[in-house]
Image: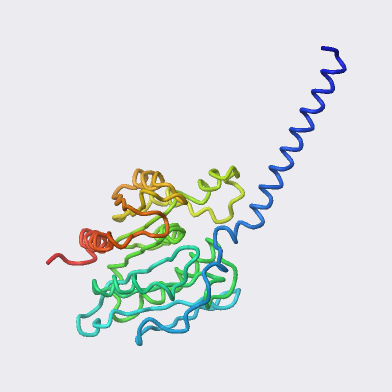
């Protein structure tokens, strides 16, 4: 092959490589610019509910630098008779709202536990832009205020998060002292999910490093995951379990958005109750 031909081939290869590199840089740049909408797609969550879940629900409004963050404290209806009750803080998934968590409220009320839900910034009735830093800070501020209430047993705090909410719960657990932590359909980190899509982890501004948090959290952890989860593969649950000192994985015959399915709802509720008994949040009969 003549030298001129070799030179031409090299130029074409170089041009292709530069083009591919440029396209990859553009791809990463678009992910960086739009990552908030990908991680926290508030527009997919729909309109907020105008109806409170119970007549005793207290609407808490936290003033932030971006406006107001809304939260609901849904007290257990019989706490004035039975005395101070545990508090469960629930963090929903990235396309959900606090107004659609009636199942969670019923579950915890059935166990004699108050429920607190902080709406993420940019979701529902909350102003601003969602991010790990904003949501964690807002949750800690609301939680500090609620834990000072009569009727709330501060020694029996439960943090429970679904999907991205599990990542939030893990970060809040690092700065509180929960008696128990529950996560479901939760990833090791957003950074690890970025790798799955060919993006470098350093571009992620809300990394939600659950695996790292689990290494530091000193509390019993229940990890629930669907065997058929195609959004957050079930291997993430195993990695989270391995990172923690006291964690247990419970797998369901479900995907990402249908955990628990109708056939396993009794198991789901029963395992949460057993976990809370083991953690000392509930007493054994």
Asked if 64 appears above or below 172 in the picture, the reply is below
Q: Quadrant of residue 255?
A: bottom left
**Among the 4 quarters of the image, the one containing residue 161:** bottom left
Specify whether 263 is left or right of 255.
left
Q: Nearer the viewer, residue 222 or 45?
A: 45
Report whether 167 appears left or right of 87.
right
Give the farthest residue toward the front: 263
The reply to whether residue 247 is visible in this rendering is no
Q: Nearer the viewer, residue 224 or 87?
A: 224
State which quarter of the image contains the C terminus.
Answer: bottom left
Task: Reply above or below: 198 against 144.
Answer: above
Image spot of residue 247 (x, y percent): 30, 50
Residue 39 visible in rendering: yes
| Image location of residue 154, percent across then percent down | 31, 71
Q: Is residue 230 above or below residue 78?
A: above
On the image, the x and y values in percent for residue 206 come to 55, 56
Q: Residue lying farthest right? A: 4
Q: Locate the N terminus and report the quarter of the image it occupies.
A: top right
Rendering coords of residue 232 (x, y %): 45, 50
């Amino acid at each position: 092959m003549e030298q001129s031909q070799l030179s031409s081939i090299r130029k074409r290869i170089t041009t292709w490589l530069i083009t591919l590199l440029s396209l990859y840089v553009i791809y990463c740049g678009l992910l960086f610019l739009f990552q908030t909408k990908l991680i926290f797609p508030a527009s997919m969550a729909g309109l907020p509910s105008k109806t409170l879940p119970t007549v005793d629900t207290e609407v808490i409004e936290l003033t932030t630098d971006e406006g107001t963050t809304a939260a609901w404290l849904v007290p257990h209806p019989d706490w004035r008779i039975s005395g101070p009750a545990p508090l469960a803080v629930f963090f929903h998934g990235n396309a959900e709202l606090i107004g659609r968590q009636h199942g969670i409220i019923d579950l915890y009320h059935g166990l004699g536990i108050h429920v607190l839900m902080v709406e993420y910034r940019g979701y529902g009735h909350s102003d601003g832009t969602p991010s790990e830093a904003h949501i964690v800070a807002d949750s800690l501020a609301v939680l500090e205020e609620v834990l000072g209430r009569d009727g709330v047993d501060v020694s029996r705090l439960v943090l429970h998060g679904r999907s991205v909410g599990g990542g939030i719960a893990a970060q809040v657990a690092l700065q509180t002292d929960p008696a128990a932590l529950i996560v479901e359909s939760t990833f090791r980190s957003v950074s690890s999910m970025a790798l799955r899509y060919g993006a470098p982890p350093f571009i992620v501004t809300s990394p939600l490093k659950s695996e790292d948090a689990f290494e530091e959290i000193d509390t019993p952890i229940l990890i629930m995951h669907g065997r058929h989860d195609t959004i957050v593969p079930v291997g993430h649950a195993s990695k989270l379990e391995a990172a923690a000192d006291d964690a247990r994985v419970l797998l369901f015959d479900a995907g990402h958005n249908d955990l628990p399915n109708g056939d396993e709802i009794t198991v789901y509720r029963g395992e949460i109750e057993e976990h809370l008994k083991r953690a000392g949040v509930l007493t054994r009969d």
